[in-house]
Image: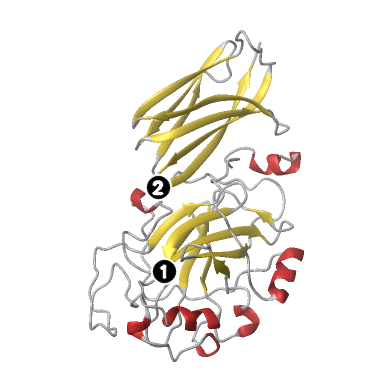
Amino acid sequence: MKRKDFLKSVGAIGLGSLIPWQQSAAGTASKETLLQDGCVLIPQETEGPYDLDLSGDTTMFRQDITEGNGGIPLYLTMTILNVNDNCAPIPNARVDIWHCNKDGYYSGFNNQPGYLGTQSHSGATFFRGIQLTDSNGEVKFTTIYPGWYPGRVGHIHFQVFISSLLKATSQLAFPESLNTEINNTELYSAHGQNSTKNTNDGVFFDTDNTQYQIVNIAEDGNGGYNASLTVGINAPATGVIDLQPETGGQFKLAGNYPNPFTTETVISFLLNTASTVAIDLFDLQGRKVMNVLHRALAAGEHGVTLKKDTGEYSLPRGSYLYQISVENANGSFRQSRLLTIQE
């Protein structure tokens, strides 16, 4: 890790990353060239009539949002960058996404018209999810290629929150030729082809902006697709972005006590579900000093003792950053705190 990247993460911002997925990129040359040279501010769009705030439901912090519903698999990676800071990745931003099922119906709402008749899905949460960006500014979702309904092409809604404040509301689209191909497949053909195209969709008709909302997408070799989108966000331009990361309700870091300490301290935390927990210690130049813990733990309260001196090492006096990373079926979550060793 470069020192300048580490210093952006000091304080409340985590340093960990999610397990990388296999990806391949496709798209227009002009879009690829621009995004390599610099990110662009994502066009702002309406949240639409089917928005739900589910951030208070810890089960919504998840990667797989299908809930067993059928469709062609779609593995979506979104990268959130700061247009005011040389396109630096923004860690610990909250990304909410939602979209309709393969037949054009949303979860959470009643009396939705469609080609299968009026349907009600109040109380359902399929194809809705929340993730927190990692140190690369990335979130990943497992979902399906969305269907369509009259007046709209296939699309996915998303919102980005920084320190719990809404910074962007937008939608992503798919290449028109792929929409046609998908709608001819066995799973989608009952609905037929969509007369609405990207160019006359009420949201995506502005092609000068829509080019930044169309995903890069390619087949994954297993009957599904890998898709990616870069999202430029207005965030503070300089200095440390002082974010208090949301932990998705997965854990609560109580901190370490005593702090400062002379011989040993206990890092205390509460897990709401069984998880794999890693605690790493870094110096303030971004160098990893040690792995304090890497273990599968049950739900409940835990305390990990960090000693200044062991048979293998002696930590010099000074300040350090420790990061706790929690991974479970709902995703990857992290938080960091400072501790100080004194004589």
**Horizontal placement of 186 versus 116: left or right?**
right
Tell which tag, 2 or 1, sits nearer the viewer. 1
- Camera-side residue of 140 and 87: 140
Instruction: Indicate the quadrant where residue 240 lies.
Output: top right
Q: Gap in Å between the C-alphas at discs 2 and 1?
A: 22 Å
Q: Is residue 198 above or below residue 249?
A: below
First in sequence: mark 2 vs mark 1: 1
At which x and y percent is residue 262? Answer: 60, 11
Estimate the x, y position of residue 314 in percent, counting from the top left.
66, 12
What amino acid is at disc 2?
Asn
| Residue 169 relative to residue 310: left or right | left
Q: Residue at x 60, y 64 (%)?
A: 231
Q: Amino acid at mark 1?
A: Ile
Label 2: how many residues lie within 10 Å, few (<14), some (14-19) or many (20+)?
Answer: many
Residue 98 percent across, percent down from the top left: 41, 66
Q: Which residue is mark 2?
A: 330
In the picture, the disc for residue 72 is: 1
Q: Residue at x 39, y 77 (%)?
A: 147
Secondary structure type for disc 1: loop
Can you say which quadrant of the picture contains the C terminus?
top right
